[in-house]
Image (cartoon, helix red, strand yellow):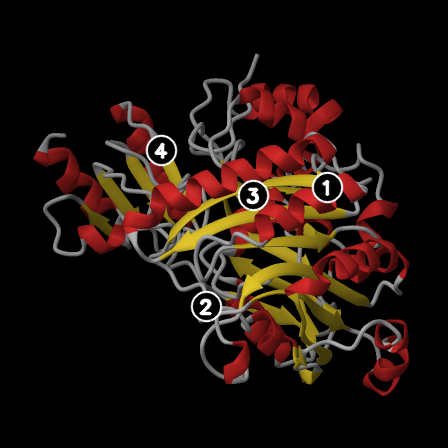
Amino acid sequence: MQEDNITALTAAVRGSVITPASPEYESARKVYNAMIDRRPAIIVRCANVRDVRTAIDFAREQGLTVAVRGGGHNGAGLAVCDDGLVIDLSCMKSVRVDPATNTVRAESGCTQADINHAAGGFGLAVPVGVISTTGIAGLTLGGGTGYLTRKYGLALDNLLEADLVLADGSFMTASAKNNPDLFWAIRGGGGNFGVVTSFLFKAHPVPQVFAGPMLWDWEHAREVLEWYREISPNLPEDLYGFLAFLTVPPGPPFPEELHLKVMCGIVWAYSGPLDQAEAAFQPIRKFRAPRFELVGPMPYLTLQSLFDALYPPGHQWYWRGDFLNEIPDAAIDQHLKFGSQLPTLQSTMHLYPVDGFPARIDRSETAFSFRDAKWSMVIVGVDPEPANAAKITAWTKDYWAALHPYSMGGAYVNFMMEEGADRIKATYRDNYQRLVAVKGKYDPTNFFHVNQNIKPN
């Protein structure tokens, strides 16, 4: 890359241009997953939409591969590329809450904490995920599952419109009225179609939740799983619980006798009226008493950040996922086998409910296809030490291979590594060809291909 070109680009943007010669380059190229070690030629840390357009035009003219970074949490590392240009949106963090319409407009560098901190000031919340440091952009474009999913839907179900910059540098808004084919595609189709620069979300009144974890000894894990598979889909939609296998962290709030024990847990979140919380929990209270519980009223933002400290940026990550509509006894056998062998403290398996509100939307209404799933499973190998990368990867792959025959065949796209074209097709099912057509219309050269890629015809 000629120095004159870099100088011209630097002069043209309000944000910053970072190259391998820049002092901040090493930190700027890092993403949440430390297993990813890629070295872009240029990082454009955008300050506004014009910077995004300038960066796209520059990359197109120079023939550079482009990756787009929002929060940088993508497990496969698709927020960064080797030798190309990274469009870094992390400084674009404007949030505007309109309490008159219960809407939130947020730029694409926002995290979940950013939007729900702002919304929480009005007693509102946007349905997003379970780690508050996750960026809203990739989360929403791929789906967005979390504590409010059963009651209010996926993050993408609450998206009202989005502003995008396309591969040719043009700017447009996608909504039900404007460019509806593009609006359909971005709700599940990821970053295949352009760079989303802002989102307009519907927000909901969630001033507080009644929430927290319950843990059972591992010897009761089969019983918990058998009970959970029956009760979870039959609970009221404002009561959500994700099941987890975990190693208890050695510190508060957990009692010392549980430290480093492998246990089976459920993290509950009730978003109905607080004076009805205990009544809602009655079916749960009838089951075996947990060994430990920390369930009570808390702000939604507190719940959403409950596990941030356990999963800081910079760890090694490898994950695999699948959608499930049943958990047969044979699958439970495999869960118990691999769950009892968690390879590191932070390695885990989660079953996230995705029934309720999402199931009432037809699978052809958005690109997100698995409206008939009951759970989104993710198996995650995590550890701070690079020396353990092979161990956590092998455990995750083996666990996933044992469970995949009991799945629906496709996965939540945000829980996928780089797993190939057939896996992408299985994830979109009968929506795939329609996505191909939209891709061909808005990005015919596949300019945006550092993603779970949908190739144009």
> Helix or strand or loop: what does disc 4 sit on?
strand
- Badge 1 crowding class, 10 Å Cα cut-off, few under 14, some 14 to 19, many 20 or more, is some
Going from the N terminus, do you reach mark 2 or mark 3 first? 2
Going from the N terminus, do you reach mark 1 or mark 2 first? 2
Picture layout, residue 401 above or below residue 94: above
* Amino acid beneath label 1: Ala
Alpha carbons under labels 2 and 3: distance apart: 19 Å
**Disc 1 + disc 4, Cβ < 8 Å:** no
Q: Which residue is mark 3?
A: 415
> Helix or strand or loop: what does disc 1 sit on?
helix
Q: Which residue is mark 4?
A: 66
Alpha carbons under labels 4 and 3: distance apart: 22 Å
Residue drawn at (47%, 31%) of the image? 418
Quarter occupied by residue 422:
top right
The mark found on residue 331 in the picture is: 1
For discs 1 and 4, the disc positioned in front in the rendered view: 1
Q: Which residue is mark 2?
A: 310
Alpha carbons under labels 1 and 4: distance apart: 40 Å
Going from the N terminus, do you reach mark 1 or mark 4 first? 4
> Helix or strand or loop: what does disc 2 sit on?
loop
* Amino acid beneath label 4: Val
The mark found on residue 23 in the picture is: none
Alpha carbons under labels 1 and 2: distance apart: 28 Å
